[in-house]
Amino acid sequence: MRSTATSWAATHRIPVVVRSVPFAATPGEAAETTRLLLAEDPAIDAVICGPDGAAPGVLGAAIAAGRAVGRDFLVASCVDGVATRTSHPPITAIDLRPADYGRACSALLCDILADRTPADAIRHHDWALGTRASTRPG
């Protein structure tokens, strides 16, 4: 994620600040990182959150800092879930379709074990972007 963000920013000549949090960051850890980030650079206008379930912490820190989420500050998550869908405002997120992914992984494993497909087979998995109020007005 870090390399994609920095590469995109360089291509578009847009400054980007990247901060790391633990892989399984809690909303509290994400909130503290966001609080420090906004204190360090109040011009930051968006955060993309990687860890599952941490985006509500980013949202809370932004609101506590007086930001209008969806207007002057955008929040998005790389993983969708109940927390992103039920936050106020709801958070834009990538729906990785985990149930479909799990079924596809099981089917692939069975196919490999039964010698119906090579062990290095590549399969693609669909995903969807749930665009919500955290990245757009209204």
Image: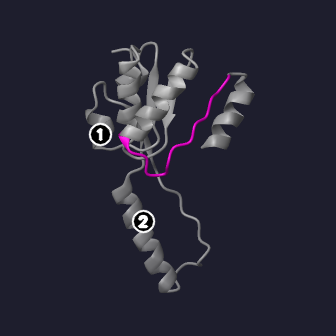
Q: Secondary structure at mark 1?
A: helix
Q: Residues within 10 Å of mark 2 (few under 14, many from 20)?
A: some
| Circle nearer the viewer, 2 or 1 | 1
Q: Earlier in the sequence, mark 2 or mark 1?
A: 1
In the picture shown, does residue 19 fall above or below 68? below
Image coords of residue 2 (percent x, y): 63, 41
**Which sits in the foreground, 98 or 77?**
77
Tell me, yes or no, whether the two marked residues, 2 and 1, touch with CB atoms within 8 Å: no
* Residue under the point 61% across and 34% down: 18
In the picture shown, does residue 50 fall above or below 88? below
Farthest bottom residue in view: 114
Q: Which mark is residue 5?
A: none
Q: Which residues are magenta?
A: 15-27
Image coords of residue 28 (percent x, y): 37, 38
Residue 21 among those drawn in magenta? yes
Dividing the picture into quadrants, the one containing residue 136 is: top left
Q: Amino acid at mark 1?
A: Ala
Q: Which residue is mark 2?
A: 104
Image coords of residue 24 (percent x, y): 43, 51
Q: Amino acid at mark 2?
A: Ala
Residue 129 seen by the camera: no
Dividing the picture into quadrants, the one containing residue 70 is: top left
Residue 81 among those drawn in magenta? no
**Which sits in the foreground, 122 or 30?**
30
In the picture shown, does residue 26 fall above or below 75? below
Q: Which residue is mark 1?
A: 83
**Which sits in the foreground, 119 or 26?**
26
